[in-house]
Image: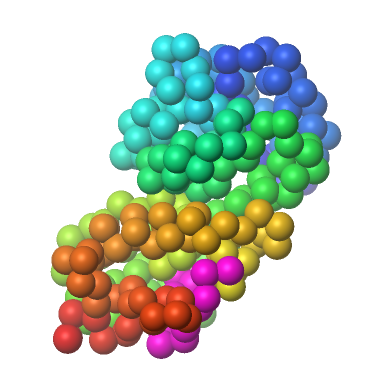
Amino acid sequence: MMDSKVILVVDDHPSFQKLVTAFLVREGYAVRNALNAAQALAHLELEEPDLILLDIKMPDMDGIELCQKIRNYYHRPILFITGTKQDEEKIKSLQAGGDDCIIKPFDPLDLVLRVKANLRWSALLEGNDNKAHILNFPGLQINLERKLVMLHQKPVVLSAKEFQMLIAFAKRPNQVFDPEQLYRLVWKDEFNYTKETVKVHIHNLRKKIEINPGKPVYIITVNGLGYKFNPYGAVQ
């Protein structure tokens, strides 16, 4: 029997913790609980979960600040949970390194589907069944097996979604993706697409792999159509 995937739920409402834990355990996941950022940080010193569900509003440190703090060493999926529908907060959560944002109240089935989609991507990136373990481009190297990106021989730290997006691009060089197509490919989600989500992740990815994000050479905007990956990169 395969080991259960471990999910850390960080939320300061015990009743919400109990509800989410029940649904996730029913799906076969092992759930750890933290009622605040301090408990979450303490847990991360002992165990690396496969995915984190992270509330934005917490008493000691908000989820966005916590995400920024742990993204230096935690690279698996982080799904934010928020009680507001404000786009600004959702954008901030993605900019902080979140992979997705779920708005309360939500359908538990939707939560489970998003968890499964992000875990599938994470497992794919950690697998060793890729035909080509290393993708090489001028100035840029992507090691699929080790989940390592090198820009001009220097390591680049990407979040899970940023890495997934880069792989989606790099495996299909010069193919133009419209934002919705890219969202379906990376998020494995047919129902929660927003153009802003894709735009924010593109912006974050460019900041990390482009020497000049204002004049990108790898992730190119194709006006009116979407984005494409330029395999010649630094040669230009």
Q: Nearer the viewer, residue 72 or 93?
A: 93
Give the colour scheme shown. rainbow
Residue 103 sits in which quadrant? top right
Q: Position of residue 161 (x, y in %)?
A: 47, 55
Task: Say if residue 120 shows up in the picture.
Answer: no
Residue 146 sits in which quadrant? bottom left
Q: Position of residue 114 (x, y in %)?
A: 67, 48
Task: Say if residue 131 shows up in the picture.
Answer: yes
| Quarter of the rendering occupied by the C terminus | bottom left
Position of residue 196 in the picture relative to residue 229 (left or right): right
Q: Nearer the viewer, residue 83 or 156?
A: 83
User: Residue at 18% across / 80% down in the picture?
Assistant: 234
User: Residue at 64% across / 14% down in the picture?
Assistant: 13
Q: Residue furthest right?
A: 26
Position of residue 14 in the picture relative to residue 226 (left or right): right
Q: Position of residue 59 (x, y in %)?
A: 47, 12
Position of residue 156 in the picture relative to residue 79 (left or right): left
Magenta stretch: residue 94 in it?
A: no
| Residue 149 sits above or below residue 235 on the image | above
Position of residue 162 in the picture relative to residue 34 (left or right): left
| Residue 14 sits above or below residue 140 on the image | above
User: Residue at 62% across / 40% down in the picture?
Assistant: 102
Count of picture labels: 0
Q: Nearer the viewer, residue 112 or 26?
A: 112
The magenta segment is 167-180
User: Residue at 57% across / 64% down in the picture?
Assistant: 183
Q: Position of residue 170 (x, y in %)?
A: 41, 77
| Residue 99 sits above or below residue 214 on the image | above
